[in-house]
Amino acid sequence: MHIRAVTEDYIKDLLVRGTREDGRDPSEFRPINLATGIMPNAEGSAQVELGSTKVIAGVKIGVGEPMSDKPDEGNMITSAELLPVASPNYETGPPSPEAIELARVIDRGIRAAGMIDTKGLFIEQGKVWEVFTDIYIINYDGNLFDAGTLAAAAALSTARMPKYEADGDKSNIIREGSLGRLKIANTATSCTFAKIANSVILDPDGNEESCMDARLTIANDENVVRAMQKGLSGAFSTRELDNLMGITFERSKELRKLIENAKA
Amino acid sequence: MGGSNKPELIKDGKRLDGRTPDMLRDIKIEVGVVKNAVGSAYIEWGNNKIIAGVYGPKEALPKHVQDPERAIIKCRYAMSPFSSLEEHGRSGPNRRSIEISKVTKEVFENVILLDRFPGAEIDLFVDVLQADGGTRAAGITAASVALAASGIPMTDIPYAVSVGKVGDMLILDLNKIEDNYSDADMPVAIGPRTGDIMLLQMDGNLSRDEIKKGMEMVKKSGEYISKLQKDALKLSYERILEKYK
């Protein structure tokens, strides 16, 4: 409790003086490292290092049944796991509300941007492709939303597409050999802001998150906002929201570029 | 979003239920529907029927969840298995309801004076009996009234409503079918005293300008929703006065 208070004083004091622990601008990301194809067994994979936050996303593609309300569309399932190894504050057990929120917000950005054309994942009556994206938090140092979205988008954007072969009653999924890529129709990225006292900063690290009053994630593509989520007890004014959308459109360019480079 | 067999949601500037783009559904709020609760409210918002109830402040249990500096809020949003037109739903929390419980709790962490009740918990239950789109917004609006009725000190009485988009047109307060087929949905909760955004979620596609306009629509309708909330509270006190006349 006391250590938290000291950290909070320190972070707030820095912000009042217009700076941050690592000297970053309020609307600047930490250095980002993106590597794709790191786990060849998965159809797609990516690792994102955002400062010391480290996240891995793995994509597996299988065959399953369509949802009853969308019989001609494939499925997309996104989960996030806050591994106990990633932070002394994470525990084993069923997913916490935080982990569920993280997965659902990442899912919404990717889904609303139409990154995957689920209609193109139809195989035959009662059979569709299912795209599972699992986001593994390996080391926590803040801003899991943007690191997770980037990892998921990069893993999906570089995933290979298995082939389905039906031979009479038998069916077979071919996962190796010469395969094309999973068809990607758009790119979603996100920018997450922390409000601490009267300052709003992009890409909060662990210390900054420990004293933030509110959090706002804005997911977008090149043209429009695709998903938003406000978190925690603090609030934003409509003017702040408008400013943050402007920063998001500007800053997301670098994130999209990372994904484009990984695709090439 | 999107989906197959998309119905025509707007015809001649009117929506399927006859509303204009910036019109709310009918809203009715009643205070004190659950006698056992410290505060409660029932809301009918279009075809949504939702009960919100408050218990506490009381000692937070188990003890390890206690915060020595402030009260904690435990919030459970849940849909009844018979709440939708589709098949029987599964009871118990699912990923959607866990997320909604979390964002609902966070709205009230903003306005309740939690530091007045160290070590305590405040239980907030939002039970959706019948659902027709916009249940989280209606639930927050009802929960605000339930909390105000409970006498727990708050700095504001938030309201919530969603705004969405069909084609190029922004529409207020999406019902279920609009929610299913719209191009965007953005539930918002506002504290009317400050105008602060306390809940903000969105998915679909909206430009920066549309979000700005959507926020204006929310705030404009909020004046009316706020009035309904306050009228419901007032009426509940007038009824008590009646009794002792």
Image: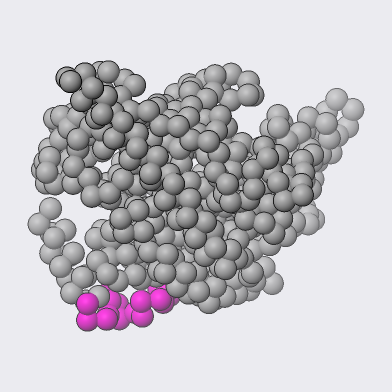
Between residues A211 and B132, which one lies in front from this camera angle?
B132
Q: Can residue B54 be seen in this view?
A: no
Q: Where is residue A112 in the image (x, y as percent from the top left)?
A: 62, 53
* Residue ID at (64%, 48%): B20
Image check: A226 left or right of B187? right
Could you say which quadrant of the image residue A113 lies in? bottom right
* Residue ID at (33%, 40%): B230
Image check: A14 left or right of A2? right
Query: Which span is picked out in magenta?
Result: A16-31
* Residue ID at (52%, 56%): B217
- Is B159 drawn above or below residue A215 in the view shown? above
Q: Position of residue B32 (x, y in %)?
A: 30, 24
> Which secondary structure type mostly characterizes the magenta part of the structure?
loop
- Is A102 drawn above or below residue B238 in the view shown? below
Query: Which quadrant holds the C terminus of chain B?
Result: top left
* Residue ID at (77%, 49%): B12
Could you say which quadrant of the image residue A139 lies in? bottom left
Between residues B207 and A30, which one lies in front from this camera angle?
B207
Q: Position of residue A155 (x, y in %)?
A: 60, 58
